[in-house]
């Protein structure tokens, strides 16, 4: 194979004055307005670069500049923006791209170049240093770990950090930290007026060790409750609602968080409790009812017209208010949720057959793995999101098990192969142990994103989980399934009854169900 000669240092050379630079299109208005067909994606665009293979759009050029590896033409390890005759990525020299500059002017790393012909890391380093300058040209020692995390930490996209640093609210927040206007504590971050960038920055500060670890769900609930109470300053029953939130809800949440990390649904449920308590107190004020003089007929008139979910959310406030003598002792119907429908066994198997093989409509790999975890092991989204790569163990015989309980659950083929593919796709520099890492440093994929991602690929979450749990309950006694998958035995016992299982006489273990060793979950 004949290949063009390399420049001595693999950098671009200055072309002779008689040789036109064909890698960049003309900057004249006529040239910019002309539409070309991109040689790679085939779409009509204003040409961004003209390489030997033809005119390329901006999207294809930037994607090409992110490819690094061993060039199949020359065997060198470098950037691979070109395309060989077989379509494989090749280096600039082998592709004949000799007039474009790809090497950073400071560190000489090849890739996308940004301001002043610097690579992404050098550009981010300069901007972080400017934003975290404490006024005398230096970064405060307490913020040095943050500067390092912003500069070297992984991002979902190559330019993602630059985009984040360019947003005015983020820049103002970093300057406030650098100058001491914003003290580096969790309460002060909660009190910061612009809360948009706070969750990401807090996760970054905790991840790099600048701030202590906290329960993220508890912290977000505290901040949410503070903002909610501030808006209720003029409410007729503000004092009652403040007592409910600060004296009842918050201590209860802190107690739970001390035992184990709170889940996103736990925080959401507490918020719904307060929202429906506010709605009830607003109704009291609108109808001139004093809480301590509320009658049974009045409570029934309000409570019975609520949806079943709203009733359940209001029960916590009513019970607390009656116990604390803020409401008279009244009665209200107990909320009973039906077990609901479930997918048929055939529908569940059809979904599994859809997600395991590779095809255009199967969805992203990590969502397919999450779907199989739900369909095979009936795991809730809150537990799926906190799985780590260490929860999957390869046995001596080559089989894979999943550590959900005691004993570990076997991982059958071809799902085991799907898991191995997901693990193999992790970046070489990945420091997170989460199976589904999120955008926030040190945090797993959040509950909303994972739930929505599963719905987007066609998984009915509740129906699928109930179907999986009932099928498992038919295969073994409820206590055995509970211990192996990390459930309470009453959960599996209830589904065994609904599924018509034959294990109803199997004795449950004495005492509480043994659980697997606790994992460190996202806070």
Image (cartoon, rainbow, N blue to C red):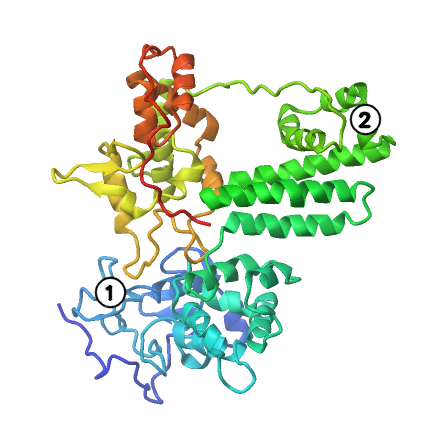
Q: Residue at x 60, y 68 (%)?
A: 168
Q: What secondary structure is found at the residue carrying circle 2?
A: loop
Query: Which picture quadrant has residue 240?
Result: top right
Provide residue 287's location: percent of width, then percent of height: 86, 30
Q: Is residue 200 shown above or below 513?
A: below
* Percent position of residue 421, x then y: 26, 45
Q: Is residue 489 above or below residue 258?
A: above
Quadrant hosting residue 189: bottom right
Q: Quadrant of residue 155?
A: bottom left
State the separation of the CA atoms marked 2 and 1.
74 Å
Looking at the picture, tell me which residue is in the foreground, 497 or 95.
497
Label 2 or label 1, whichever comes before in sequence order: 1
Residue in view at x 34 percent, y 39 percent: 369
Q: Which mark is residue 294?
A: 2
Numbered disc total: 2
How far from the left and from the top, in percent, is residue 405? 31, 34
- Camera-nearest residue between 158 and 176: 176
Q: Say whether residue 460 is visible.
A: no
- Extreme residue in the bottom direction: 17
**Horizontally, is 170 left or right of 123 in the view?**
right
Viewer-nearest of discs 2 and 1: 2
Front one among 73 and 504: 504
Give the position of the N terminus as an image quadrant: bottom left
In the image: residue 348, left or right of residue 288: left
Residue 236 visible at all:
yes
- Which label was assigned to residue 69? 1
Residue beneath the point at 59% across and 60% down? 187
Asked if the residue under mark 1 is in contact with the one under mark 2, i.e. CB atoms within 8 Å, the reply is: no
């Amino acid at each position: 194979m004949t290949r063009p000669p390399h420049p001595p240092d693999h950098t671009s050379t200055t072309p002779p004055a008689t040789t036109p630079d064909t890698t960049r299109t003309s900057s004249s208005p006529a040239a910019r307005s002309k539409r070309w067909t991109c040689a790679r994606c085939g779409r009509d665009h204003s040409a961004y670069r003209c390489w030997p293979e033809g005119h390329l759009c901006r999207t294809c050029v930037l994607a090409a500049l992110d490819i690094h590896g061993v060039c199949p033409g020359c065997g060198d390890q470098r950037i691979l923006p070109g395309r060989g005759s077989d379509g494989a990525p090749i280096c600039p020299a082998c592709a004949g791209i000799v007039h474009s500059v790809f090497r950073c002017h400071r560190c000489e790393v090849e890739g996308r170049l940004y301001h002043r012909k610097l690579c992404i890391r050098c550009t981010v380093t300069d901007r972080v240093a400017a934003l975290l300058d404490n006024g005398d040209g230096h970064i405060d020692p307490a913020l040095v770990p943050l500067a390092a995390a912003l500069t070297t930490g992984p991002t979902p996209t190559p330019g993602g950090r630059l985009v984040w640093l360019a947003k005015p609210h983020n820049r103002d927040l970093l300057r406030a930290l650098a100058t001491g206007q914003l003290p580096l504590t969790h309460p002060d971050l909660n009190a910061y007026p612009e809360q948009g960038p706070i969750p990401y920055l807090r996760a970054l500060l905790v991840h790099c060790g600048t701030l202590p670890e906290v329960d993220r769900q508890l912290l977000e609930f505290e901040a949410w409750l503070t903002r909610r109470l501030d808006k209720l300053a003029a409410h007729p029953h503000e004092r009652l609602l403040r007592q409910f939130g600060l004296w009842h809800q918050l201590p209860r949440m802190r107690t739970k968080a001390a035992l184990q990390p709170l889940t996103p649904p736990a925080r959401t449920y507490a918020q719904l409790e307060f929202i429906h308590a506010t709605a009830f107190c607003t109704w009291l004020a609108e109808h001139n009812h004093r809480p301590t003089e509320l009658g049974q007929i009045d409570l029934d008139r309000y409570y019975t017209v609520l949806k079943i979910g709203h009733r359940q959310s209001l029960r916590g406030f009513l019970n607390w208010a009656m116990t604390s003598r803020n409401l008279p002792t009244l009665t209200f119907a107990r909320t009973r949720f039906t077990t609901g429908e479930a997918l048929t066994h055939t529908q569940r198997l059809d979904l599994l057959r859809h997600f395991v093989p590779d095809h255009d409509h199967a969805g992203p790999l990590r969502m397919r793995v999450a779907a199989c975890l739900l369909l095979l092991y009936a795991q809730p989204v809150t537990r799926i999101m906190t799985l780590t790569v260490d929860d999957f163990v390869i046995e001596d015989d080559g089989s894979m098990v999943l550590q959900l309980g005691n004993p570990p659950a076997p991982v059958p083929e071809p799902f085991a192969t799907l898991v191995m593919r997901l693990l193999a796709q992790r970046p070489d520099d990945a420091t997170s142990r989460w199976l589904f890492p999120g955008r926030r440093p040190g945090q797993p994929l959040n509950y909303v994103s994972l739930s929505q991602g599963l719905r987007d690929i066609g998984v009915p979450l509740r129906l699928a989980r109930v179907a999986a749990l009932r099928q498992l309950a038919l295969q073994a006694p409820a206590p055995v399934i509970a211990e192996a998958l990390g459930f309470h035995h009453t959960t599996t016992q209830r589904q065994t009854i609904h599924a018509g299982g034959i294990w109803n006489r199997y004795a449950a273990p004495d005492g509480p169900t043994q659980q697997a060793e606790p994992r460190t979950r996202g806070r």
